[in-house]
Amino acid sequence: MHGAVQVFRYLNIGGYIALAGVAVLLYGRRRDLGAMRAAAAFGSLGLLELLGLIPNDPGNLAERAVGRLDVILLVLFPFLLFRFTTTFRPARRDLGTTLFGLTGVLVVWTLALPRVPASGESWPWWFAAFVLVFLVHWSALSVLSAVRLATAGRRQPSVARSRMRMLSFASAAITVAIILVVFSTSSGSVVALAAQILALSAVVSFYLGLSPPQLVRMAWRLPEQTRVQIAIASLLEFAETPEEVVGRVLEPAARLVGARAIAIRDAEGTVVGAWNVPEDLWGRLTRRSGDGTEVVAPGATKLDLDLARGSIVVWASPYAPFFGEDELGLLRTLGSLTGVALDRVRLFQAEHEARLELERANEVKASFVALAAHELRTPMTTIHGFVTTLHHLGHRLDDGQREQLREALLQQTQRMASLIEQLLDLSRLDAEAIQIEPQPVPVRSHVEEVVAASARDPGAVDVEVASELVAMIDRNALDRILSNLVSNAFRYGQPPVTVRAEQSDRHFRLTVEDSGEGVSPEFVPDLFERFSRSDDSRAQAGGTGLGLAIARSYARAHGGDLLYEDAEPHGARFRLVIPTEQEALSR
């Protein structure tokens, strides 16, 4: 039995020294607070095992000092392990202060001990009291650390949960081992052997919790790995919208590191996908420079990870950066693949929209050519007929007939000239060849001029515009828009017609309202389309169907818009809305 105890004893010495080396190397690689506290805690155990190889001779001052240092390291280890757990979840201030004070008292008590009894020597009462307080202190801190690690790991991914459970088990196992060592009667007893076995299981568990081998991590990671593989496979499937990509990938990506929310951004910092991000967290999506970790609330950490073409943000527990290094690497990979998938969706949508736009442009072009040819054919046919009549039969016509033909020719040429001018307007607007040059315009006097020139009956137009109103607007654009609206009000509506204008701090608004029947609801979506006229308007009035299309194009070239709404109690109301010069510049 004694031989077995010695074998396990040497295994433990080597194991704890190796564990200390692993902790120190971990700190050298990570250089963060958690790694530093782990190195302090497990380094103290390794140093304790090294010092334990030195004999403790009560007659030798140096060896007695080594013995005291052994006890001090034993006192400090559970407190250092507790401090390691507070890296991720801070303890209450009063609890931390109390435990620090008790640990300090025990260290001072250790230094004040008259001597440390040798192995096999009976304990005086003052040493027995010290051992009792030491065991209570060790047990309380170790159990507290074990509970904190075990409870924190419940909602963590498999690897982090398993690592924390290993550390939790090791904390409990080494506590039991220490108690068994204290109460073992001899170095060759069953109790001593059980203590060494527990100590060895603790060192293995500490190692698996602190730095598990890659094969062990892969075995622990199988549940998340399966979800990640499914998510990656889903990225290869075709998706038409960013929401589809987000729905397939971001939730498994968040589960990979136990995050409660996740968002992905492009290279410009714009959020292109998010999962479960509440409104109060959107403000924390501001672009950061490089990788970063930010504690945003107790028990919550915001991780900002750079990707090849953007970045990914996750709101996870504070344990994720320390216990989920490999998972964060997988998250980066998955985030990059998600970014590629979102780029593919955007390219598809852009191509789809461009194709639809081209198809629509082709349709508009074909319709434009057909309708323009049709509209031009009518006056051209009439003009050709009149000219032919004058050429062949002019000598047979009396003066009255020739006068009628001249008036008809004038009317048709004016109609054709107007149509050609409108077509040229549209072509220039489409080519963005019309310059919009806002300038101060006295609105009332200018509206009255346009009404007098374009209204069939200027007296039937009520101009409700303040005489002092001056707007920054392009005169030509205002002329074209207002003249078309007033002409349409008389052509398709009924008088009286009302023109109103007002200006706020940000917009100039002009309204033209007639008292007719208004526009039928089913025709409203096509109201501003080129050459579009309802059956009723086509039957009751002439026109080309280009006026409103031209008016809206001028409004939009000015940075504004032309809108339609039903008037009350009946009639049509067209509202021109143009931003002021400052507002247009801010766009």
Image (cartoon, rainbow, N blue to C red):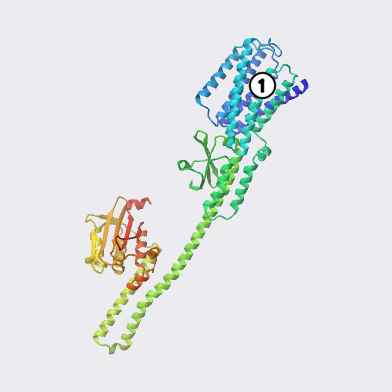
Q: Is residue 127 visible?
A: yes
Q: Is residue 210 visible?
A: no
Residue occupying the point 54% across, 52% down? 244
Position of residue 283 measured from the top left corner of the image (x, y, whole percent): 45, 41
Inspect the image, locate mark 1, and give the three-letter code of the amino acid beneath it.
Ile
Residue 388, horizontal then vertical, whole percent: 34, 85
Q: Position of residue 55 (x, y in %)?
A: 70, 16
Q: Quadrant of residue 370?
A: bottom left
Out of 281 and 432, give the one closest to the viewer: 281
Q: Residue furthest front?
A: 569
Left/right of residue 476 with respect to residue 210 in the rendered view: left
Q: Looking at the image, which residue sits at the far bottom?
A: 396
The quadrant in which residue 56 appears is top right
Q: Give the mark count.
A: 1
The answer to whether residue 365 is left or right of residue 109 is left
Q: Which residue lies under the disc numbered 1?
A: 178
Mark 1, other Cα within 10 Å: few <14 / some 14–19 / many ≥20 = some
Which of the two residues, 350 or 5, is positioned nearer the viewer here? Answer: 5
Looking at the image, residue 586 sits to the left or right of residue 280; the answer is left
Query: Which x, y percent locates residue 122?
Result: 69, 11
Along the line of sight, the residue nearer the viewer: 101 or 57: 101
**In the rendered image, the vertical position of residue 167 relative to residue 285, given as above or below:** above
Q: Quadrant of the N terminus?
A: top right
Q: Residue at x 44, y 67 (%)?
A: 364
Q: Which residue occupies 45% across, 70% down? A: 366
- Local secondary structure at mark 1: helix
